[in-house]
Image (spheres, helix red, strand yellow):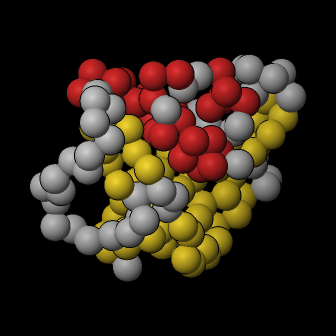
Amino acid sequence: MARAAVGDAVKRPRTASRVALARAGNGGTWLRQVEAQLDFSVENGWYQTGDARITMLDVRAVNLEVAQPEVKLTSCVDSSAVVDRYQSNSQPIPAVSDNGDRHRLESRLVYARSAETARKMWILVDEKTTKTC
């Protein structure tokens, strides 16, 4: 749900809502990174089309014996269908990276009370690209 909300937000960064992203389970460092990406897109007149797809998901660690239970995941995300475009004419932005369309991500989720909903939920708080897959 958290990544789906981010996928929707990058398609329309001008109207993306931090509250909606947080309600969908985005938080912490991850939410700040998403907000920075959205701000950059708005400032440069960009948006995205297409959807990234998770092609592999592995549970690396689970710790339920702490105040904020935590799950660490490794996933492979295929972004080959994602295209960055200019708002002004919908033309694709020339790609400047050659690091491929498949990226390995390390994600951390915590089970905590959401500041937006006041209910406990799994919140994606950190995600880093570690290499290609």
Q: Position of residue 114 (x, y in %)?
A: 75, 27
Q: Nearer the viewer, residue 68 or 29?
A: 29
| Front-lying residue, 103 or 122 | 103
Quadrant of the rendered image containing residue 71: bottom right
What is the number of callouts on the image? Answer: 0
Counting from the top left corner in percent of width and height, residue 24 is at 71, 37
User: Residue 45, percent across and down?
Assistant: 28, 28
Q: Is residue 57 left or right of residue 83?
A: right
Residue 112 sits in quarter = top right
| Residue located at (83% from left, 21% from top) | 118
Report the quarter where the C terminus lies: bottom left
Residue at 71% across, 48% down? 1
Image coordinates of residue 7 in percent, x first then y, are 54, 47
Q: Is residue 20 left or right of residue 130?
A: right
Q: Residue at x 80, y 40 (%)?
A: 121
Q: Is residue 124 visible?
A: no
Asked whether residue 44 is in view, the answer is: yes
Camera-side residue of 20 and 108: 20
Left or right of residue 131: residue 34: right
> Residue most toward the left?
96
- Tell me the residue at 63%/49% (across/down): 4
Q: In this rendering, is residue 103 above or below 64?
A: below
Q: Is residue 114 left or right of residue 44?
A: right
The image shows residue 35, relative to residue 1, as above or below, that is above
Q: Vertical placement of 53 versus 92: above or below?
A: below
Residue lying farthest to the right in this orientation = 119
Q: Residue furthest front?
A: 89
Above or below, comparing residue 125 to residue 73 in the picture: above
